[in-house]
């Protein structure tokens, strides 16, 4: 080996290793999708969606009620904030009901099922008593409470049907009786038809459609056979056709589907057409809050049944899509709660409430868009009306209670409790040990498949 200039043997350098190839950058779309999937799978996702989504809908509804009802109030020689103040009062009372329902145990909810059903039936019978019941827009479905306050008992009938049916089906499932079609139908269908009959005596077919949707949703959750499901659906369809054919008003509403210009005579589509006009003039971001033109006497029921049209005119496509996204999130969260529980009562109650809110939102928005006949039902949590808002907020409290009761959600909430109730820097002697115990319980719950 030849020597170097210094007389020392040359140092042999180790062969340089080839550089490892740089990791390819992860696709940002895929990374975003994985983050979204992890967020959806968190234990408290349903809880936050129900709580946050419902509160956002209520707050946005209050804003739109104030904007859409000012002209109507002034035309009736009332203060411009008259309807807003009544809706705000109802929302405040509903907030108390929501908080109470979200903190009540499941056993108490089941115990209240029969009293709520009996009270709803009693009030719906009182509606038909002369001198007690009131007629509003041709429907005999109201009871006056004095002054400008009224109550619609049929709205509480929705909540009564959900709670009572969930308790009934849960008890029959525990006794393994739902495999027999007689136990699946009796007394669920007869009691539902009783409520439907009392509602139809007042002429409110829109609320009857919502109750029918709740009934079919519960039967589907109970695992009704296809023949049984189709048979009950056929009977309901025949009764619906008869009720529509025998009423010129309902036939006129059916004729207004897809109407683009008002007509004269029986089929007057003034409301349906001006609802389309309001949506069409909104554009992408709307004309601005409070700048609606259709609410100046052109669009009837601008703050109740057609508040979605005013929302489209003032907030544009962005506002209407936001409302749709909130209802979609609420529906997803309700389905998730119903699908992940092992308690049959929670599954039927959560499914019934989700069917109720989703079906009513679809019917209202579909009528405003001209895709469905005008049924006269309000947009849940959004339209003006305390009678509709109070039971719906109580039902939202039910969903919140059920979402908090999931095993993974209970563990996640338990992990967060030590953050509150003591000052920073102070440690209790048993603090770390209790914290680690909760962490082990939470990890065990996640490893067992519970989220």
Image: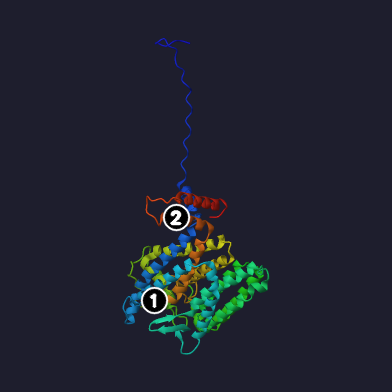
Q: Position of residue 38 (x, y in %)?
A: 49, 52
Q: Residue beneath label 2, please?
A: 416
Q: Nearer the viewer, residue 361 or 211?
A: 211
Q: How is the image coloured?
A: rainbow
Quadrant of residue 349 in the image?
Answer: bottom right
Query: Are there few (<14), some (14-19), or many (20+) residues within 10 Å of tag 2?
Result: few
The correct choice, above or below, for 70 with respect to 334 in the image is below
Marks 1 and 2: which is nearer the front?
A: 2
**Quick one: SS at disc 1?**
loop
Which residue is the extreme one toward the right? 180
Q: What crowding class fits label 1: few (fewer than 14 Cα within 10 Å), some (14-19), or many (20 or more)?
A: many
Residue at image coords 41%, 56% = 420
Q: Quadrant of residue 179?
A: bottom right
The tag on residue 299 is 1
Q: Secondary structure at mark 2?
A: helix
The count of marks equals 2
| Residue appearing at x 67%, y 74% in the figure | 182
The image position of residue 144, as x and y in percent, is: 43, 84
């Amino acid at each position: 080996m030849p020597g170097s200039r210094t007389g020392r043997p040359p140092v042999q350098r180790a062969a340089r290793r080839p550089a490892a190839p740089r990791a390819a950058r992860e696709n940002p779309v895929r990374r975003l999708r994985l983050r979204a999937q992890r967020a959806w799978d968190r234990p408290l996702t349903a809880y936050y969606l129900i709580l946050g989504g419902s509160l956002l809908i209520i707050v946005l509804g209050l804003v739109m009620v104030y904007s859409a009802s000012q002209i109507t109030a002034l035309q009736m020689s009332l203060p411009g904030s008259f309807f807003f103040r009544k809706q705000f009062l109802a929302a405040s009372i509903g907030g108390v009901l929501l908080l109470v329902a979200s903190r009540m145990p499941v056993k108490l909810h089941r115990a209240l099922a029969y009293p709520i059903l009996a009270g709803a039936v009693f009030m719906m019978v009182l509606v038909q008593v002369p001198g007690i019941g009131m007629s509003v827009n041709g429907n005999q479905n109201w009871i006056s409470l004095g002054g400008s306050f009224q109550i619609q008992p049929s709205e509480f009938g929705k909540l009564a049907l959900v709670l009572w049916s969930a308790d009934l089906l849960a008890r029959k499932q525990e006794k393994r009786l739902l495999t027999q079609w007689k136990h699946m139908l009796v007394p669920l269908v007869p009691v539902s038809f009783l409520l439907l009959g009392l509602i139809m005596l007042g002429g409110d077919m829109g609320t009857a459609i919502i109750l029918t949707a709740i009934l079919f949703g519960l039967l589907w959750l109970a695992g009704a056979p296809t023949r049984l499901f189709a048979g009950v659906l056929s009977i309901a369809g025949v009764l619906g056709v008869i009720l529509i054919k025998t009423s010129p008003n309902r036939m006129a509403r059916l004729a207004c589907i897809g109407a683009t210009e008002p007509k004269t005579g029986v089929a007057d589509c003034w409301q349906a057409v001006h609802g389309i006009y309001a949506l069409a003039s909104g554009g992408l971001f709307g004309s601005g809050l409070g700048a609606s033109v259709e609410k100046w006497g052109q669009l009837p029921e601008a703050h109740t049944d057609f508040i979605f049209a005013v929302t489209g005119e003032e907030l544009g496509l962005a506002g209407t899509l936001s409302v749709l996204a909130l209802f979609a999130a609420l529906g997803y969260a309700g389905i998730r709660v119903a699908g992940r529980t092992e308690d049959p009562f929670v599954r039927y109650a959560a499914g019934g409430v989700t069917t109720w809110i989703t079906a009513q939102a679809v019917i209202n928005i579909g009528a405003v868009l001209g895709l469905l006949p005008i049924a006269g039902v309000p947009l849940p949590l959004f339209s003006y009306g305390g009678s509709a808002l109070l039971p719906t907020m109580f039902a939202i409290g039910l969903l919140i209670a059920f979402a908090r009761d999931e095993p993974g959600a209970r563990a996640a909430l338990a992990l967060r409790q030590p953050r509150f109730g003591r000052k920073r820097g102070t440690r209790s002697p048993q603090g770390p040990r209790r914290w680690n115990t909760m962490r082990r319980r939470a990890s065990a719950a996640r490893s067992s498949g519970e989220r």
